[in-house]
Amino acid sequence: MPEPIQLKFDGGTIIVSDGDADVRSQLPGVSFDPRTRTERAEGRAYRAIVEHLLTHKIPYADQARNYQVAAWSMQSTRVPFPHQQEAVDVWWKSRGRGVVVLPTGTGKTFTAMLAIQKSQRPALVITPTIDLLNQWHFELSKAFGGTIGLMGGGEYDIQPLTVTTYDSAYIHLDRWGNKFGLLVFDECHHLPGPTYAMAAVGSIAPYRLGLTATPERADGQESQYEGLIGPTVYRREIKELSGDFLADYETRRIYVSLTADEQQRYQTARETYRQFILDRNISLGGPNGWQRFIFEASRSAEGRVAFQAFREQKKLERAAEAKLQTLEQLLLTHAKDRILIFTADNATVYKIARQYLVPPITHQTKARERKQILERFHSGEYPVVVTSQVLNEGVDVPAANVGIVLSGTSTIRENVQRLGRLLRKQTDKHAILYEIVAKGTSEEFSSERRRQHHAFQ
DNA sequence: TTGACTCAACATCCTTTGCTACAA
DNA sequence: TTGTAGGTTTCCATGTTGAGTCA
């Protein structure tokens, strides 16, 4: 009679030893590690291994798992919205693994708390920013009482219910990887980054919940969710919830023309870099096309000129004179509204700030000043705020009812997040998102692409 | 405790025409 | 014959954030 199989946790992996060698080699995800001469699996294989052992009635000793069932109970009588309850029910039916897609402002946090209560397991909530870390800590303390752990932002205190950042999660993986049965990935579109993903790979947590408003990624890595968290189990779009849970809204596109001078400089710059691409036989649209351009561009004087031309062209379309004129008109039209202006670059943010005496927020704005500006925006003291990309995600921004997108990336996510800034529900609110596009430039294409989302059709 | 700093990680940056090799 | 899928170099500049260090 062979010894029972031993499972041990070791720095994000599970070491499998003893028992029958043939049985060990058939365990899902297990392979021989020649460095240490042991059989190992990634932490995430834990559930599959245990299920395999149980199904085949193979005796085993589990020293990997280092947590107990936790009897969570929320100290709140709040009744979930239908979409929150449905999301948790579907997630639980999918064996407690999967991604839930809900628009910003429709109660993702409360949905996660329902899931935590349902799972009855110690849970680790992972967030991308310190702001969100603090928000979650506050909400969890209020909902569940007791001491809520914090790992990140200078704190290191692990409790059965803990909040951390993606950075801290992977840095300290070896210390927490076997202490939680449930992982909640807030804004889970961050997870597929090569380093951040390690947290999901190395943890043994059988239950996993991903939350995001925008699962789509520009690099197509959303295909990784399946292996890191689970499949998309529930999805509701802005359109489906606007009116009832989100404000009513419309989007308006305004086309402007470049001046003759801008037009000429734009054409010259564009031809310069298009010619380089042609000469080097690079197909920009193809796989690795952009990487090849960068590679070639960094290798010769000619290439550097081409790259400069590319940047010049971008700059011209982003900061077109006519855009600022249109902005001025919109500011007059909406003199009584609460307006957020978005750009792609900081230079334009500061230019607008100087020209129209509007407070700017970029990554250079210190946290305290940022908070102050947002508070004054909320109170109405500042009716307009101009920002680049910082407010795209994570920060709790007071409700605006008019958004003006002067420039941006072609990503769906940025566009959805910017729209989300306007949709916090208030009585009789009707939000408008303007998008100002320079005619005859590549912006027309970007604008088209970022609108390829249900919310904008 | 705070603030200034450095460093590391992540995201975006492109678009379509013509060519080739291979599968149905 | 027609249709379709197709590949490899470590990486320019800018924006943003978290962690860590040091005064």
Image (cartoon, coloured by chain):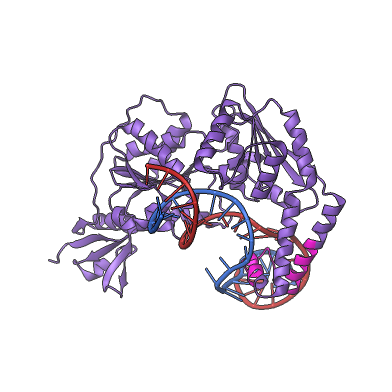
Chain colours: A purple, B red, C blue
Question: Residue A134: image x %, image y %?
Answer: 41, 39
Question: Residue A91: image x %, image y %?
Answer: 41, 42
Magenta stretch: residue A214 in it? Answer: no
In the picture, the quarter occupied by the C terminus of chain A is: top right
Q: Does residue A172 show up?
A: yes
Front-most of residues A123 and A303: A303
- Give the answer, above or below, for where C12 lies relative to A131: below
In the picture, the quarter occupied by the N terminus of chain A is: bottom left
Q: Residue sitting at 69 percent across and 25 percent down?
A: A336
Answer with left or right where residue A415 lies relative to residue A81: right
Question: Residue A153: image x %, image y %?
Answer: 39, 47
Answer with left or right where residue A370 lies relative to residue A386: left
- Give the answer, above or below, for where A274 lies relative to A106: below
Front-most of residues A360 and A294: A360
User: Which residue occupies the extreme left position in the image?
Assistant: A1
User: Which residue occupies the extreme top position in the image?
Assistant: A427
User: Residue A353 falls in which quadrant of the image?
Assistant: top right
User: Residue A115 falls in which quadrant of the image?
Assistant: top left
Front-most of residues A85 and A345: A345
Q: So how many labels did they put on this image?
A: 0
- Give the answer, above or below, for where C20 lies relative to A233: below
- Give the answer, above or below, for where A405 lies relative to A192: above
Q: Residue sitting at 35 percent across and 39 percent down?
A: A116
Q: Which residues are magenta?
A: A269-295
Front-most of residues A235 and A331: A331
Question: Residue A329: image x %, image y %?
Answer: 77, 34
